[in-house]
Image (tube, coloured by chain):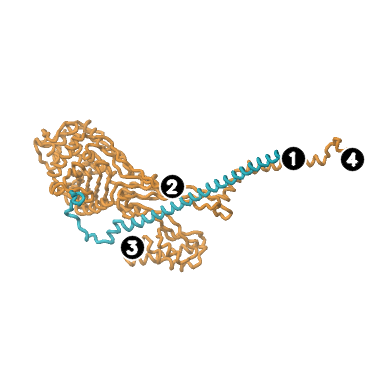
Chain colours: A orange, B cyan
């Protein structure tokens, strides 16, 4: 039997309007959903994503610590320490400002810089009262959400205040530079100050030259957090060494640096000099073993000193080297084969007249037919003019430039640049420059040039950085670099012997070392006056030398500006040189070669 | 018919086991990666903490052994310059003598 229903189903019945409406509604619903999806995901998608990220992601900026600076014997010269700023939230204070101020003042007073520097008890008492009042006034600013009370507090002070358990007080920590050896090697290290955007930046010295290497890097860390801002998946605030700055190891030795700073200070007092410089380098490598200049400044309190003191005078200040330049003139003459140490000067019987100028020797004494070795020992200006004239200006100029006069040193110190090299080379200029007048150079350039004589004629690049240590501990050693061969090995040895003769029988022979052979030369130069010509009775006394001559372990330049006890280098700079050298022989393990 | 059904069963059982093993193995491998990642992070943090501690100790040591601190705690006039250093240029050890 066939039911009526099966009969009716077999018939093709057109859908009712109701079902059409239902299908249409479903399609419309789908279109609405799709369009909303399109709206939220495509049109509004990007900002929604950002908003969601803001809710469950937290981005922290981590500033790596600045790299440290060590001496070559691995003593810390510049390190980092954490200092704390005491801050308060006045609206959260549980005690009266008056009471809080009274409680914390005896603890923080010892970290108050002005209080530390005060010497009289009345002044100290006044500062104590001032600080108490200052803190009280700050705490009374109820309308402020945050007030700074006192910066530069130590960890001990911080812990003492925490023990008081005062609500509304807090600390903000900052990494600051500290100098365990105080102002030692200030001209080498430089200092840290804020730039115009408030970032810590290195200025002068190694801090300035290697600011990029030493600076800690900024690192952004993104954490996934829950509704309370706590990190998910057990993520902690990840710390890493990778964004720390690189440590720098200098070539200087702490004991030698300390020695020359002490002796320079004493020497300046002894000879009444306005300023002074001592520089010690290793001729074979060009490494600076120690460098000191007075007056100097304190890196930590640099702002209390005149800004002219920040520059390293040994690197920057130009001076007329005077007679120490004669070593280069003699070396050029021998290397170019226009003279030998035995050559006799045929034009040294009296003053030299060039045009309207008459050039004399320093003591107005003349030595006809003097040989070149004695001429260097007696510091004879006329013999130097003889050599320069034999060389002629082009060749002499070439030798000076080859010795690195006027040339950038390539040392990692802020302010290292080419210095002016004279362009005009007439007969008078050639004559005066042969004995170091009318030409400007720096102490470091001069030491580098004479080091070439000590180092078999090889000019080495001046070096202050021994190595750089990456945050992962990898050490990159900076190798000594030869720039060029300036003079032949033979010439270097001949000039060295001439310098030994000069040290033994020259003006400074009275102070010659009783135990060690030294190759050296004195130099007394005049100081150019602002209105042209030279200053009356004002000199720069310098003494440059190395030891032992056959295998030099050090080369030292001592320079005293305007010494008052005597204008002559033989009576000021030379004795100071030997005084330092006496201790240097012990420090560098150089055995005596005569008694 | 019965044999064919058994074969299907065996095939799907083996396939199931294989998939199950793969799932377990993948979970195990992933857990290892996660564990290693966490361990690495923990060790990196520990290394950082130790480096920080080492640097702080080096700072303290530098303060205590600085020449400045030495000159403040010692009377430097108690020390004299070595005027006649002893120079040993020959070995006098027993081993060298023999």
**Numbered disc 1: secondary structure:** helix
| Labelled disc at residue A27 | 1
Q: Earlier in the sequence, mark 4 or mark 3?
A: 4
Cα separation between marks 2 and 3: 43 Å
Residue indicated by mark 3: A118
* CB atoms of marks 2 and 3 within 8 Å: no
- Mark 4, mark 1: which one is toward the viewer? 4
Q: Quadrant of the N terminus of chain A?
A: top right
Which chain hosts label 4?
Answer: A
Instruction: Please say if A231 is above or below A392.
Output: below
Q: In screen coordinates, is A242 left or right of A332? A: right
Q: Secondary structure at mark 2?
A: loop
The residue at which mark 2 appears reads as A242
| Left or right for A509, reference A36 | left
Percent of width and height locating residue B55: 38, 53
> Subunit of mark 3?
A
Question: In front: A153, or A496?
Answer: A496
How would you rate the neighbour count of disc 4 (Cα within 10 Å): few for under 14, some for 14-19, many for 20 or more?
A: few
Comparing labels 2 and 4, the label whose residue is closer to the camera: 4
Q: CA distance from mark 1 to mark 2?
A: 58 Å
| Mark 2 nearby-residue class (10 Å; few <14, some 14–19, many ≥20) | some
Disc 4 on helix, strand or loop?
loop
Whether tag 4 and tag 1 are in contact, CB under 8 A, the answer is: no
Q: Where A274 sits versus A447, above or below? A: below
Name the secondary structure under disc 3: loop
Residue A287, by quadrant, is top left
Indicate which label's residue lies in the foreground, 1 or 2: 2
Tag 3 or tag 2, which sits nearer the N-term? 3
Q: Is residue B48 in sight in this rendering?
A: yes
Mark positioned earlier in the residue sequence (2 or 4): 4
Q: Which residue is mark 4?
A: A3
């Amino acid at each position: 039997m066939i039911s009526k229903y099966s009969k009716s189903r077999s018939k093709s019945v057109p859908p009712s309007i109701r079902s059409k409406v239902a299908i249409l509604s479903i399609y419309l619903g789908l279109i609405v959903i799709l369009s909303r999806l399109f709206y939220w995901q495509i049109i509004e998608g990007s900002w929604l994503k950002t908003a969601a990220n803001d809710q469950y992601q937290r981005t922290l900026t981590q500033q790596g610590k600045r790299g440290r600076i060590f001496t070559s014997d691995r003593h810390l010269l510049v390190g980092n320490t954490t200092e704390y700023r005491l801050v308060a939230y006045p609206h959260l204070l549980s005690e009266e400002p008056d009471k809080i101020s009274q409680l914390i003042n005896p603890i923080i007073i010892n970290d108050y810089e002005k209080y530390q520097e005060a010497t009289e008890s009345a002044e100290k008492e006044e500062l104590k009262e001032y600080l108490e009042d200052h803190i009280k006034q700050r705490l009374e600013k109820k309308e402020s959400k945050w007030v700074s009370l006192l910066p530069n507090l130590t960890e001990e002070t911080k812990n003492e205040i925490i023990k008081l358990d005062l609500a509304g007080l807090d600390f903000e920590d900052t990494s600051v530079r500290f100098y365990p050896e105080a102002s030692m090697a200030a001209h080498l290290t430089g200092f840290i100050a804020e730039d115009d955007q408030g970032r810590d930046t290195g200025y002068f010295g190694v801090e300035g030259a290697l600011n990029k290497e030493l600076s800690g890097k900024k690192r952004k860390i993104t954490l996934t957090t829950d509704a309370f801002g706590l990190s998910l998946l057990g993520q902690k605030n990840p710390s890493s060494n990778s964004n720390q700055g690189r440590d720098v190891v200098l070539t200087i030795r702490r004991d030698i640096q300390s020695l020359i700073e002490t002796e320079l200070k004493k020497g300046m007092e002894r000879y009444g000099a306005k300023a002074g410089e001592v520089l010690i380098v290793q001729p074979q490598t060009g490494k600076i073993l120690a460098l000191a200049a007075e007056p100097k400044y304190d890196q930590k309190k640099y702002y209390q000193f005149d800004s002219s003191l920040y520059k390293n005078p040994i690197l920057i200040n130009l001076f007329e080297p005077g007679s120490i330049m004669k070593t280069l003139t003699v070396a050029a003459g021998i290397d170019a084969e226009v003279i030998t140490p035995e050559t006799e000067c045929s034009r040294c019987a009296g003053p030299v007249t060039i045009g309207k100028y008459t050039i004399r020797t320093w003591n107005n004494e003349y030595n006809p037919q003097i040989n070149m070795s004695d001429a260097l020992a007696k510091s004879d200006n006329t013999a130097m003019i003889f050599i320069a004239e034999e060389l002629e200006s082009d060749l002499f100029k070439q030798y000076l430039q080859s010795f690195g006069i006027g040339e950038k040193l390539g040392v990692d110190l802020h302010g290292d640049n080419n210095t002016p090299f004279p362009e005009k080379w007439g007969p008078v200029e050639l004559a005066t420059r042969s004995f170091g007048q009318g030409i400007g150079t720096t102490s470091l350039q001069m030491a580098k040039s004479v080091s070439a004589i000590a180092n078999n004629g090889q000019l080495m690049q001046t070096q202050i950085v021994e190595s750089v240590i990456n945050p992962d501990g990898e050490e990159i050693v900076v190798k000594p670099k030869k720039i060029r061969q300036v003079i032949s090995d033979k010439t270097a040895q001949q000039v060295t012997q001439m310098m030994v003769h000069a040290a033994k029988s020259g003006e400074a022979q009275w102070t010659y070392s009783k135990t060690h052979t030294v190759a050296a030369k004195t130099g007394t130069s005049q100081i150019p006056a602002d209105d042209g010509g030279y200053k009356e009775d004002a000199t720069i006394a310098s003494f440059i030398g190395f030891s032992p001559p056959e295998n030099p372990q050090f080369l030292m330049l001592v320079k005293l500006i305007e010494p008052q006890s005597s204008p002559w280098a033989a009576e000021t700079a030379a004795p100071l040189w030997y005084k330092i050298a006496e201790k240097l022989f012990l420090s560098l393990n150089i055995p005596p070669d005569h008694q | 018919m019965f044999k064919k059904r058994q074969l299907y069963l065996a095939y799907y059982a083996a396939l199931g086991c294989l998939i199950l093993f793969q799932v377990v193995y993948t979970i195990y491998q992933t857990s290892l990666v996660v564990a290693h990642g966490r361990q690495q992070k923990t060790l990196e943090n520990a290394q950082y903490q130790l480096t920080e501690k080492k640097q702080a100790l080096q700072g303290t040591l530098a303060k205590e052994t600085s020449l400045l601190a030495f000159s403040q705690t010692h009377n430097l006039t108690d020390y004299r310059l070595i005027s006649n250093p002893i120079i040993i240029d020959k070995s006098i050890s027993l081993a060298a003598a023999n």
